[in-house]
Image: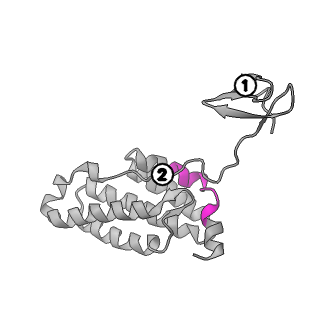
Amino acid sequence: MTDSLIDLCSAPLHPQAAQGLRLFNAGKYFESHEALEAAWNEETGPVRDLYRGILQIAVVYLHIIRRNYNGAVKVYGRSQKWLKDWPAICRGIFVEELRRDAEAVITEVERLGAERIGELSRTLLKPVHWEENQGQKKRTYLCDRCGHEMYENNCKVTCPNCGNRFDCSDLNIYFD
């Protein structure tokens, strides 16, 4: 993997791509496609291809739900062009897992054939695993009493130096 691809994969997701993944995981494949397409259109670099590949898997799953065998097989073939060269994890997205999951789905679709595509178990339509906060800056809390860095646990922020505590939603105490 080249340094530029490592840098590219460590960058945060486009907000529309993140929304597209949430919709994908909710089984809203058409809406997922729309959000990922918006991210694809707004991006300028090679990561566009990653978003394009994922949105096409959403379309594959939509075709399966609609019992469109030919559409599912055709779009799956296209999706592989866009997903094949990405590392196992990129921008927090488990790309290799998505490729394997989609391959398992299309293998079963092809086994069932056009007449029996409706028999495909929806449990095969796996979510996209991803780290939602990957690449985002971690909040830093400083104690307003002693100035020491505080630590968050389940939205409770505690100073290990003086014991000061507050809820992380109390923004009037939050300092960056």
The N terminus lies in which quarter of the figure? bottom right
Magenta region includes residue 29: no
* Residue 156 horizontal side relative to residue 131, left or right: right
Badge 2 element = helix
| Residue situated in front as seen by the camera: 73 or 12 | 12
| Residue situated in front as seen by the camera: 24 or 138 | 138
Task: Tell me what residue is drawn at x 58 percent, y 72 percent.
Answer: 46
All told, the count of numbered labels is 2
In the rendered image, the residue lying farthest to the front is 161
Magenta region includes residue 17: yes
Task: Tell me what residue is drawn at x 44 percent, y 56 percent.
Answer: 33
In the rendered image, the residue lying farthest to the right is 146
Magenta residues span 9-20
Mark 1, residue position: 170
Mark 1 / mark 2, whichever is N-terminal: 2
User: How far from the left and from the top, in percent, is residue 164?
Assistant: 77, 22
Mark 2 crowd level (few <14, some 14–19, many ≥20, 10 Å Cα): many
Residue type, mark 2 in image: Leu
User: How far from the left and from the top, in percent, is residue 143?
Assistant: 81, 29
User: How far from the left and from the top, in percent, is residue 44?
Assistant: 63, 69
Badge 1 element = loop
Magenta segment, principal secondary structure? Answer: helix
Mark 2, residue position: 21
